[in-house]
Image: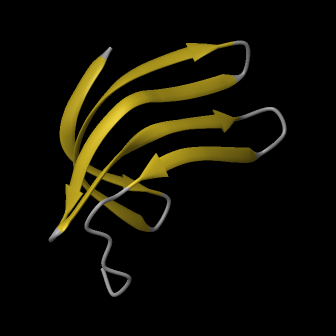
Amino acid sequence: MKLYTDIWFEDFQVGNAKAQMSYKKGHLYFNNIIGQLKSTDYQGNVDVDLLKSRIRVDASSDSFRSEE
């Protein structure tokens, strides 16, 4: 499923992003994420392990602003 929307995860604003979302064996995957939060652009992948309550993020940004 492809997504493009203003995303919130728990209480954290992720910003406007598009991603490929899938689910397999207790894992919710957000792959090929391309997003923007205010002036920060980012890209990456997220694996939400629903069985072990863990989140793995592999992401990068060329314009990261910590106050955002």
Question: How does the figure colour the protein chain or chains?
Answer: secondary structure
Count of numbered labels shown in the rendering: 0
Q: Residue furthest front?
A: 62
Residue 43 falls left or right of residue 11: left
> Considering the image in quadrants, where does the N terminus appear?
top left
Query: Eyeballing the image, is 39 above or below 48?
Result: below
Residue for point 15% across, 70% down: 39
> Considering the image in quadrants, where does the C terminus appear?
bottom left
Q: Residue furthest right?
A: 52
Residue for point 53% across, 38% down: 46
Q: Pick whichever, 22 or 46, lies toward us.
A: 46
Q: Position of residue 66 (x, y in %)?
A: 38, 82
Residue 41 falls left or right of residue 8: left
Q: Position of residue 52 (x, y in %)?
A: 84, 39
Residue for point 53% across, 26% down: 29
Query: Eyeballing the image, is 33 above or below 20?
Result: below
Query: Eyeballing the image, is 15 above or below 38?
Result: above
User: Which quarter of the picture shows residue 37?
Assistant: bottom left
Residue 46 falls left or right of residue 38: right
Q: Position of residue 59 (x, y in %)?
A: 47, 48
User: Which quarter of the picture shows residue 40?
Assistant: bottom left
Residue 35 falls left or right of residue 56: left
Q: Position of residue 65 (x, y in %)?
A: 30, 79
User: Which quarter of the picture shows residue 67?
Assistant: bottom left
